[in-house]
């Protein structure tokens, strides 16, 4: 082991605000709002408050897929929530999601607004709202789809908050947690690779919410786009996951959804807010950037 010291937990834990790595300024052991800040509201039935992280991408991909199917009621306004600035702790956002995590959805299509939070709940809500789109209506097919959807919900924290944190964001590199979570992530990739060696998509022949939920995490991982860890994790050892990831990446709705609320990477791939379908053609960051001198 390369760790040079051993941490001995105190009898009672206390919050050290300076200790926490890249997210020390926004992580805290209490809930609730830290400031008053109302959320903006656009003209569409669905109001999304999010950021282009993997969990946020799940929902924007779902909405773009619904629109591609012709569901006009899925038109939406996507408002940017900058979590590194603590906007998720504003009073308006906390009212929509008491857990202060993105994404959060407010459905204003009925007489009373409906709030939905947690990405998996949002995907199921939208699927059911639009006639079980991307979600089998019942029986074994639905059970299989939901099993893989919830597999993603339970597995991704080991990839993100576990491996990703200690490999990319923790204030120091420590062998034990990196090895512990790398082992689990590779096990998860093997689960997916074995499954996808036998079927086209996670739940079978059809593209479902299980794929929409899983692709932003594990698709990005095997394409070397997450944490710069592709070589470290030997992602080339999972060819069936790579095949699946590449196929989904070719879907136009997925390409659009990945752009929404995105604040990193090529300016042409960043659409900070989305209010109309035409925004993809006119309001990406490369088009809004001032001309160079």
Image (spheres, rainbow, N blue to C red):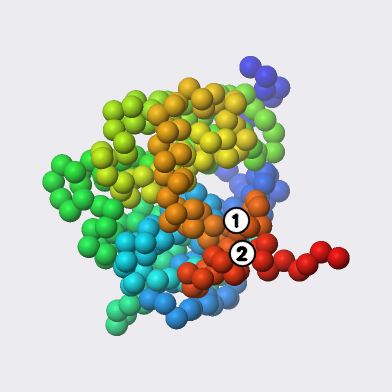
Q: Closest to the observer: 139 or 29?
A: 139
Q: Closest to the observer: 239 or 80?
A: 239
Q: Position of residue 48 (x, y in %)?
A: 46, 67
Tag 2 and tag 1, C-beta contact below 8 Å: yes
Q: Residue at x 29, y 28 (%)?
A: 198
Q: Position of residue 87 (x, y in %)?
A: 59, 65
Q: CA distance from mark 2 to mark 1?
A: 7 Å
Q: SS for tag 1? A: helix
Q: Position of residue 50 (x, y in %)?
A: 51, 62
Q: Is residue 113 left or right of residue 48?
A: left
Q: Residue at x 48, y 69 (%)?
A: 277
Q: Closest to the observer: 292 or 21?
A: 292
For the N terminus, which image quadrant? top right
Q: Which mark is residue 269?
A: 1
Q: Is residue 293 visible?
A: yes
* Residue 239 higher or lower than 282, as above or below: above
- Quadrant housing residue 34: bottom right
Q: Earlier in the sequence, mark 2 or mark 1?
A: 1
Q: Closest to the observer: 18 or 14?
A: 18
Q: Is residue 184 visible?
A: no
* Residue 253 higher or lower than 114, as above or below: above
Q: Residue at x 32, y 61 (%)?
A: 69
- Quadrant housing residue 233: top right
């Amino acid at each position: 082991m390369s760790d040079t010291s051993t941490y001995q937990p105190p009898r009672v834990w206390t919050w050290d605000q300076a200790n926490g790595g890249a997210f020390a300024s926004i992580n805290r052991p209490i809930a609730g709002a830290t400031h008053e800040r109302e959320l903006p509201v656009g003209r569409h039935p669905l109001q999304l408050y999010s950021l282009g992280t993997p969990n946020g991408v799940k929902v924007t991909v779902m909405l773009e897929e619904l629109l591609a199917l012709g569901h006009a009621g899925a038109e939406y306004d996507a408002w940017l929530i900058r979590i590194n600035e603590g906007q998720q702790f504003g009073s308006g956002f906390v009212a929509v999601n008491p857990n202060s995590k993105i994404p959060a959805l407010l459905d204003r299509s009925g007489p009373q607004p409906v709030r939905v939070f947690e990405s998996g709940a949002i995907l199921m809500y939208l699927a059911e709202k639009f006639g079980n789109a991307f979600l089998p209506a019942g029986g074994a097919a639905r059970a299989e789809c939901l099993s893989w959807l919830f597999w993603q919900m339970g597995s991704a924290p080991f990839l993100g908050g576990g491996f990703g944190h200690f490999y990319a964001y923790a204030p120091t590199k420590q062998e034990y947690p990196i090895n512990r979570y790398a082992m689990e992530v590779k096990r998860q990739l093997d689960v997916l690779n074995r499954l996808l060696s036998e079927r086209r998509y996670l739940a079978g022949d059809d593209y479902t919410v299980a794929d929409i939920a899983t692709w932003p995490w594990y698709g990005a991982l095997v394409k070397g786009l997450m944490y710069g860890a592709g070589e470290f994790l030997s992602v080339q050892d999972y060819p069936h996951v790579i095949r699946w990831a590449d196929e989904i990446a070719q879907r136009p709705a997925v390409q659009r959804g990945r752009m929404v609320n995105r604040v990193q990477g090529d300016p042409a791939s960043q659409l900070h807010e989305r209010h109309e379908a035409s925004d993809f053609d006119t309001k990406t960051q490369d088009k809004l950037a001032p001309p160079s001198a």
